[in-house]
Image (cartoon, rainbow, N blue to C red):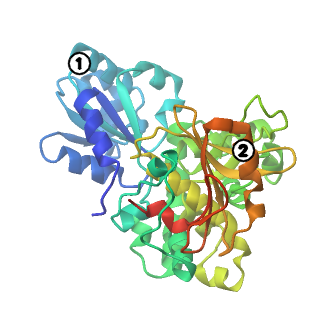
Amino acid sequence: MYPRFARARIEEALSDTRVVLISGPRQSGKTTLAMDIAADKTPFLTLDDATVLEAAINDPVGFVRGLERAVIDEVQRAPDLLLAIKNVVDDHQSPGRFLLTGSANLMTIPKVADSLAGRMEVIRLFPLSQAEIIDSKSQFIDRAFAGEKPIANHVIVGAELIERVLSGGYPEALSRKKWSRKQDWYHGYLDALVQRDVRDVAQIEQLGLMPKLLSVLAEHSGQLVNYTGIGAALDLNHVTTQKYVSVFESLYLVHTLRPWFTNRLKRLTKSPKLHFLDAGLLAAMRDVSPDVVRKDKTSFGAILETFVFSELRKIAAWSEQRCTFSHFRDKDKNEVDIVLENRRGEIVGIEVKSSATVSAGDFSGMRKLADACGDRFVQGMVLYDHDKVVPFGENMFAAPLSCLWGRS
């Protein structure tokens, strides 16, 4: 079993919070982790079991009555259960009563968010990070906000890096040796998700279009979102397209990264940016393998940016910082791929390059961002395919991609 570094945060939450929800995509390891935390001392109920699901839907109050503590798996399949849980934990307010898992973002459902406000902590669990795969707990985000020079003590470059990126983080896919078998798993995973889970989170009039829409989105990963342009290929208007994209967001397949803004700069792009949440999934949808990249690396850049975004989201799950994510782009097309902002308003900028060289020009967007932030700007990095950390001015570094899984 791979180590899951979010475990400590989950156990801490259970010590002082009535309800804890492990939320993330299917097959990311939520159930395995929840069962391991609960061990044999807590009842385990999964709503993937048809009989259990029937009971939870038809009599949610009776379902939770008498449960002192419980693990309830895939709770998004019976959202009315959460109101029953609210009433139970209001009557007896001891911490750690319910450990839930969910493969959909329940907090996008208003009645769910309202019913458990102040009673539930949500902790994201994404597919495996590189740090978990090599069992080296990354401190990348904490070091960056501390203003410490990036470090790379488990360097992966070149062909090995390409393989790591394209493999993604889903444990089942990682266990397969052949690339065709990895990609078969990803396609089967998507087919099952669309056929079952989409129905659980939304009323979709044109369910048959969802796989096609996902394929179109794969071609737009790493780009600014244009719902009209995306929908045009499927004869969908921008309103319907945005609604359907939000369904994929709630299932942790894609993420629309909001633009960073400040009143100090008026000429900023206001469009969000689209990312898939797993590089292996994106690579499978684009039919990109290491052999393809060796022949032509142009397909690799967008997948690498998705990989870095995904790794940062995973590291944030156990970081001491509580970060929001955005992107920076002004009207002159100066941009920074990923902007991290902590609760104090401090800023770290991350730019991603697939090449082994970095020039001063690669920091043009970062310098614009630093000027806009003033004293709030802590550090800017251009991550690249190399083993050397190179300073490019005050608080600016070209840093190996391997810094993402480095520790002090």
Q: Residue at x 51, y 32 (%)?
A: 343
**Where does residue 369 sit, x and y in percent of width and height?**
72, 44
200 or 401: nearer the viewer: 401
**Where does residue 146 sit, x and y in percent of width and height?**
48, 46
**Where does residue 145 sit, x and y in percent of width and height?**
51, 45
Badge nearest the viewer, 2 or 1: 2
Q: Residue at x 68, y 46 (%)?
A: 327
Location of the N terminus by quadrant is bottom left
Q: Earlier in the sequence, mark 2 or mark 1?
A: 1
**Left or right placement of residue 349 versus residue 152 in this view:** right
**Left or right placement of residue 119 versus residue 402 in this view:** left
Q: Residue at x 74, y 62 (%)?
A: 362
83 or 208: nearer the viewer: 83
Name the residue tied to disc 1: 93
Against 251, residue 176 (above or below) is below
Q: Amino acid at mark 1?
A: Gln
Q: Secondary structure at mark 2?
A: helix
